[in-house]
Amino acid sequence: MLQNFKAISLSYKKAPLDIRELIALDEISCRQFLQTLKDFIQASDILVLSTCNRTEVYYNADADYSTEIVKLLGITKGIQNITQYLDFFTILNEHNDAVQHLFEVAMGLESQVVGDMQISNQVKVAYQWSADCDAAGPFLHRLMHTIFFTNKRVVQETAFRHGAASTSYASIELIEELTADIIDPAILVVGLGEIGADVCRNLSDKGFKNVKITNRTLAKAQQLAEECKLEVLPFEDMVQGLKEADVIISSVARETPFFTKEMVQRLNVLSYKFFIDLAVPRSVEAEVESIPGVLVYNIDTIQNKASEALQSRINAIPKVREIITESIAQFNDWSKEMMVSPTINKLKNALEAIRQEEMARYMKKLGPEEAKHLDNVTKSMMQKIIKLPVLQLKAACKRGEAETLIDVLNDLFDLEKQSSEVQTEK
C-alpha cells in the first residue's frame, strides 16, 4: 500500500505575525496537541512543528483531515472560532508535495532568513516529540533519518550553511545599523531561550562589549554569560538595565506582552531606545512605539541582509535542491518497496513451508550429518529460487508496475491462503 503523506501549514508566507502568534504552540502545547491528534484522527505518522515563523502538522492518512486538525488546534489553544483563519493555512494533500515541503522546511529553504540554521534542530526536536508520543511509524522514522542525512550532505557539499545568516544574526545586522552613530552601544538581552542565547553568541562573536543579559532563571544566565564573556543583570534589577540600554532584545516566552506601554513610559526615555522583539507571541506591546523616542522592531520587520554569507547561501540553492531531489528519489524507492515487502515475506513463508514439508519426509531416514547437509542444501536452493522474483518485484516498484506482479505471485503460489493458514497456526 502506498503512503498518503499530507501537510497543513501556517507560515509567514500567508499569515501575518498577529495570526501566527495567536496559533503558535510551545513544547507543552505541542505534546498535548500530538496526543489529541492521535486520539481523533486515523493517521499512522504525525509530526507537529511550531516555530516563530510557522505552525505545521504532517500526517500519514488516506483521508483529508485538514479542517479537523485546525479545529483541534483551536481546542488546544482555546480559540473557539479558529476556522475563520482557515484561509491563512496552506493544505498539501498530495504525498509528493508534502514530502518535498518537509525537506525544504528542514533544510532552511522555506525560512524567512534563507538557510536559518535553527530550523534543522527544531525539526529534530519535533520528531523527538513524535517518537516520545508514539506518533511516529516506520514511514516517518525513515523519512526523518533521510532528511537528517540530507542535511549533512548540504553542510558538507555546499556553501548553504556557511556564515551565520539566521534570524538571530539578522537581528545583529539590524543592531549594527541602528547603533552606527553610537559609541559602544549598551545592549540588554531579556530572555534566554534558543533564539535569545543565539543572539548572545552572535553579539559576542561580533565584538559587542557593553552587553548585559537577564533571565528569570539565574543559573541559565550565568552559564551563558560565562560562555560568551557577558555580564549578568539580576532579573530584579532589570528596570535599571532598561534605563541604561540603547537596545533591548526580547525573546521572553509568554502568552501576553512582557513589555507594556505603561512599563516603558516609566523609564522616562530621553534618547532613542530600540526594542527588538524576537518572541512569538510578541513580548513587546505594539503601543510601546507610541512613546516618543522608542522604536519597536518585531520578527517580521527583521529583513534579510544582503551580506556575503546570505548571498553565498542563495547561490548554493540550486545544488541544495539537487541533493534534495536525489534524497527524495532514494526515499521513494524505499517507500515503494514497503508495498511489496509483505508479498516477499509471504512468498518466503510459502517456499519455506514446502521445504519443511519435503524435509519431513526424509529426515527420519537420515543421520544427523546427512540431515544437516540436506537442510543446508535446500535452504541454499530456496534462496536462489526466490532471488529473481524479489529482484523483479523491486524493479517493478520503480516502474510503478508492482501491483500486477503481486497479483501474479499471489495467484501462482496462493499466497493469501498460505498467509491465512500461518495466522491460524499462530
Image (spheres, rainbow, N blue to C red):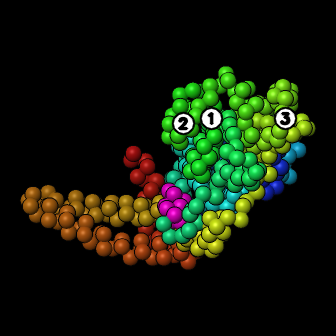
x, y percent for residue 232: 59, 31
Q: With 80 as the anchor, is 110 left or right in this view?
A: left
* Residue at image mark 3: 270
Crowding around mark 2 (Cα neighbors within 10 Å: few <14, some 14 to 19, many 20+) is many
Magenta segment: 145-155
The residue located at (9%, 61%) in the rendering is: 369
Q: Nearer the viewer, residue 378 or 203?
A: 203
Secondary element type, mark 2: helix
Q: Picture quarter containing residue 242?
A: top right
* Residue at image mark 2: 225
Quick check: 92 above or below 272? below
Q: Picture quarter containing residue 109?
A: bottom right
Quick check: 350 above or below 85? below
Q: CA distance from mark 1 to mark 2?
A: 7 Å
Q: Nearer the viewer, residue 108 or 367?
A: 108
Q: CA distance from mark 2 to mark 3?
A: 29 Å
x, y percent for residue 72: 75, 39
Secondary element type, mark 1: strand
**Residue 269 visible to an observer of this rendering:** yes
Crowding around mark 3 (Cα neighbors within 10 Å: few <14, some 14 to 19, many 20+) is few
**Residue 33 visible to an observer of this rendering:** no
Inspect the image, locate mark 1, and give the three-letter code of the amino acid beneath it.
Ile
- Disc 1 to disc 2: CB gap under 8 Å: yes
Per the picture, the main secondary structure of the magenta-coloured stretch is helix
> What mark, if any, has residue 213 been given in the picture?
1
Queried whether the magenta region covers residue 407, the answer comes back as no
Inspect the image, locate mark 3, and give the three-letter code of the amino acid beneath it.
Leu
Q: With 40 as the anchor, is 366 left or right in this view?
A: left
Crowding around mark 1 (Cα neighbors within 10 Å: few <14, some 14 to 19, many 20+) is many
Queried whether the magenta region covers residue 148, the answer comes back as yes
Q: Nearer the viewer, residue 166 or 370?
A: 166
* Quadrant in which the N terminus appears: bottom right
